[in-house]
Image: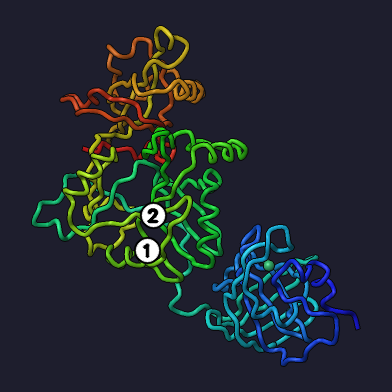
Amino acid sequence: MADKLAPYRGKRSAKRTPEPVPAPGPLPRGHDDTFVIQEHHARALHWDFRLERGGVLVSWAVPKGLPLDPKDNRLAVHTEDHPLEYASFEGGIPEGEYGAGRVTVWDRGRYECEKWTDDEVKVVLHGERVQGRYVLIHTRGTQWLVHRMDAAPADRAPLPELVRPMLATLGELPPAAQDGRYGYELKWDGVRAIVYAEGGRVRALTRNDLDVTAGYPELRAFGEALGSTSAVFDGELIAFDAAGRVSFGALQQRMHLQDAARVRRLSAQTPVTYVLFDLLHLDGRDTTRLPYRERRELLEGLALSGPHWDTPPYTEGGGPRLLETSREQGLEGVMAKLLDAPYEPGRRSRAWIKVKNLRTQEVVVVGWRPGQGNRADTVGSLLLALPEADGLHYAGSVGTGFTRQMLDDLRTRLSKLERKGSPLAGAPPTRDVKDAHWVSPKLVGEVRFTEWTRDGRLRHPAWRGLRPDKSPQNVARES
Ligand code: MN
C-alpha cells in the first residue's frame, strides 16, 4: 500500500520545522473518530480541518473556517494527509518553510462518520466550539464545499449584512447635573466606517453604504487579528499629518482611490487607523439593544489594538475635562453618549450629542468660478448649496482652504458635471455668479465656518475636502 504520508514528508524537513515528521513505517491504528481544527496564520489566514481516518488526518484548508449557518457554504481545499501526531501540534513554522506562520488548535473533539466516499464526507462533530452535522462535497480538483446540514443554534443570529450607523445630534455638553449619565469619547475627524468581520475577513462600509474595503488595505491585518470572531464594529477611519495630528486633510488623499497600485503606495505613505468605538454584533449575538455601557464593556473585552486599529477608552462623566483635552490636542470635539441608551441604527438620536470645537457644515457643490492670478486656469471658488424641502438653496461660496492638488482634482471632477443652468431652486444670487459654471449637484464637501448669516449663508467658510462618503440628498444644515 502507498505511503499515505509521503506527500506530507516531501514538503517538510524535520530539521527545519517544529511540526511532527514521523519516519516512514506502519501507520498507527485509531478509531477514526477524532477531529481537530487548527487556526493557521500562514500567508493567508485559514483553518485546517482534519479528520482521523485510516491512520492519518485527512485534511482540508478552509479559508473562512467552518460555517455556523446552514445558508453559508464555504470553500474547503483538500490538502495532504497529516500524521495523527499533528492533532496536538501548536507552534510557529519558520519563515521560508512550507506553511510558514503560527498554528494553534482552534477546536478538537470526537466525530461520527455518517458517509465517506471519494466525493462526499458527512460527519457529526462534537467539539467544544463546534457541534453540528457537516457535509464536505467534492467540486473539482482539490476544491470541496463545506456545508452545515443541521440548523444553527437557535439563539444564534447571523452576521447582519447592513447596519447603518447611529448619528449624533449637534449640541452642547450636558448640564453638570446630567454629566454622570453620559459616557464621553474624543470625536475623531475622519470617515465613519462600519466594519463587518467574519472568518478572518473584513468588509468596511461608509455612511452612504459604499464598500471601501479595497481602499483601506490596512484593515486586512485587523481581520486576521480577529481570527474566527464574527462581529460588526462602528468606528472612524483617521489619518495623521506630518506632525502626528489627526488630519482630515491627510485622509482626503485616501478617500477617492480606485487604483490598487495607488492604494498600496498611499497606504504606505499616509496609513490610516481604524478607531473603534462601538460593537453592534458579536459571535452570533445582536448587541445593538444593549445599553452603551455594556456594548463598550464587550468591545473593550476584545482588547483590539494593533498597528492600524485601536480602541481608545471612554470616560463616564467628566465631559468638560475631556472637551478641554480635545481642544488642547487640536481635536474636533467630544461625543457624549447616554450610558443606558441602546444603539439606534440609521437614526439621528438625542442619546448621542456631538460637541464640536470647530464649526463645520456639509455642503452640496452646485457650481464654481474661475480663479485669478496663479489660479486663473483652475477653480477660484466653489458655489455651495443646502437641500431644503423645495430644492437646493444657495449657501455662499468658498475660496480658501484648498491645496493645489485639491483644486486640480476638483477641476477635473467639476468639468464632468457641467450643466447649462443653475440647479438651485429659484433665481441664483446675482452678485456671486456672473461668471459661474453650474454643475449637477452630485459632489458633497465640507467647510468650516464662523456662523450663519441672517440670509442663510455661511460666514467665512474654508474648504475642508470632499465627502464621497455622504450623499447630496442627506446633507442638512447642522445648526
Ligand atoms: Mn494550513
Residue at 52% across, 48% down: 218
CA separation in Å, label 1 and label 2: 8 Å
Q: Residues within 10 Å of mark 1 (few under 14, many from 20)?
A: many
Looking at marks 1 and 2 on the same chain, the residue that comes earlier in the sequence is marked by 2
Instruction: Name the disc covering residue 299, or none.
Output: 1
Residue 24 spot, x, y in % from top left:
85, 80
420 in relation to 10, above or below: above
Quarter of the picture holding the N terminus: bottom right
Q: Residues within 10 Å of mark 2 (few under 14, many from 20)?
A: many
80 in relation to 259, above or below: below
Q: Is residue 418 visible?
A: no
Name, please, the residue furthest toward the top.
373
Q: Quadrant of residue 444?
A: top left
Residue at 36% across, 63% down: 300
364 in relation to 37, above or below: above
Left or right of 286 on screen, residue 454:
left
Q: Which residue is mark 2?
A: 276
Residue at 47% across, 23% down: 405
User: In front: 393, or 294?
Assistant: 294
Q: Is residue 320 visible?
A: yes
Quarter of the picture holding the C terminus: top left
User: In front: 430, or 301?
Assistant: 301
Left or right of 318 on screen, residue 204:
right
